[in-house]
Image: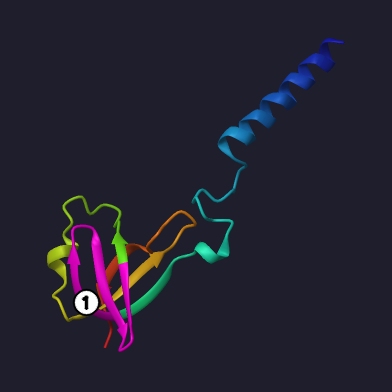
Amino acid sequence: MRLTKTTILAVWAIAMTTLLVGAPGQASTPFAGDPSLTDREITGEHRGYTNDRLFVRVSDEKEMTFVVRIPGDQEEKWHTDFKTLSRITVTYHQGPGDKLPVATAIRAAEK
C-alpha cells in the first residue's frame, strides 16, 4: 500500500510541475503554437515617428504604423538611429490583442 501512495504522489508531482512550468522542450514564446503570429519583415521608407509609434511607407498606396518595442532599447535609440525618408527593414509580429503590429527590430535596408 505504501508503494502505491508514493507512486501516486510522484506522478501527481510530475503532472503539476509540467502544467505549471511546461514540458521539457516546449516553446516558451507566448505565440509559439500559432504560426500566424511569427515574426515578419517588411521594407519601406521611414516616414517619421511619435513616441512609441513608427510610420513606414511600404508602397505608393500603403503606409503601416508600428508600435515599437525593441528588447534592450531602454533609451529608445531607434528615434535617432534612422533618418526620416531612409529605407529601413522592420521585423514585427501582431498578436491577437494588438491593435497595431509590434516592431521588435529595425535595421537599414539592404540595397
Residue sitting at x 65%, y 29%:
16
Q: Position of residue 50 (x, y in %)?
A: 18, 62
Residue sitting at x 16%, y 60%:
77
Q: Position of residue 18 (x, y in %)?
A: 63, 35
Using the rendered view, name the quadrant where residue 6 is placed.
top right
For disc 1, the neighbor class at 10 Å (few under 14, some 14 to 19, many from 20) is many
Q: Position of residue 14 (x, y in %)?
A: 68, 29
Q: Which residue is mark 1?
A: 46
Q: Relative to 69, is 74 on the left or the right? A: left
Q: Relative to 53, is 2 on the left or the right? A: right
Magenta residues (range): 44-65
Examine the residues drawn in magenta and state their main secondary structure: strand
Residue sitting at x 16%, y 52%:
75
Q: Is residue 75 magenta?
A: no
User: Quadrant where the N terminus lies?
Assistant: top right
User: Quadrant where the C terminus lies?
Assistant: bottom left
Residue sitting at x 22%, y 77%:
46
